[in-house]
Amino acid sequence: VCYIFLASIYGIMNLGIKFLFFTIFKFKRRRTQPQALLIMTMIVGVLILVLSQEILTMAPQYVTFGDQVVDGVPCSLNMMEKAKQCVVSNVSAFHGRVTLSIPMFSVIFYFVNWAFLGFFAMSFIYAVSSKTKSTLEEEEEEYEDDEERVGLLM
C-alpha cells in the first residue's frame, strides 16, 4: 500500500496534473503554482480513500483478521465455529456496515473497478503501440531551454 501511494505521488510530481491528456499544471522546483498544490492535495485525499477501500480487495484475509491465531489456526471467514473468538478489524467492520447499508455502493464499486481495468488495458495498449516521444523527455528539453534562456549553460 505504501508503495502504491508513493508511486502515485511520484507520478503526479513527474507528469503534473492532467485532464484528458491536457496538462493543467506542472511541478517545478520553486515555481509550482499554489493551485497545483491544492489540487494535488485533493488528489492525494481521494487516493487515500480509494486505497483504504482497495486494500480489502488486495488482502482480504489480513485486513479482516490481521495475524490472529486461535488454537494454532489463523482466523478466517471459513472457520465459523471459531470465528466467534476472532475479532474483526475496524476497517473490515466499517466496510461491512457500508456494504450492507448501501448496497448500491458495492455495485458501483464493482463496475468502477472493471472500468478502471478496461481503461488501464486500453492505455497500456496505446502506450506500447504508439511511437510518440516520452513526456519526460519533452519536459527535460523544456528544462534545458529554460536554463539556456536564463544563461546558466554556456
Image: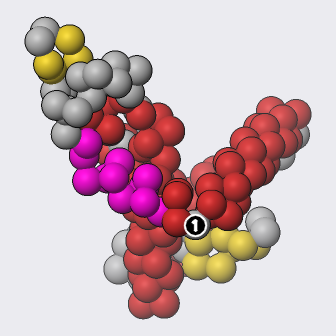
- Say which of 99 and 133 sits in front: 99
| Prevailing secondary structure class for the magenta stretch in the rendered image | helix
Vertical relation: 20 (above or below) 117: below
Residue 131 in view in this figure: no
Residue matched to label 1: 102
For the N terminus, the quadrant is top left
Residue 10 position, x and y percent, is: 43, 54
Residue lying at 50% horizontally and 39% vertically, measured from the top left: 57
Question: Where is residue 3, by image quadrant?
Answer: top left
Kind of element beneath mark 1: loop
- Say which of 106 and 18 sits in front: 106
Residue positioned most to the left: 71
Residue 115 in view in this figure: yes
Vertical relation: 109 (above or below) 25: above
- Say which of 87 and 145 sits in front: 87
Q: Which residues are magenta?
A: 88-98
Question: Where is residue 32, by image quadrant?
Answer: bottom left
- Disc 1 marks a residue whose amino acid type is Ile
Vertical relation: 78 (above or below) 21: above
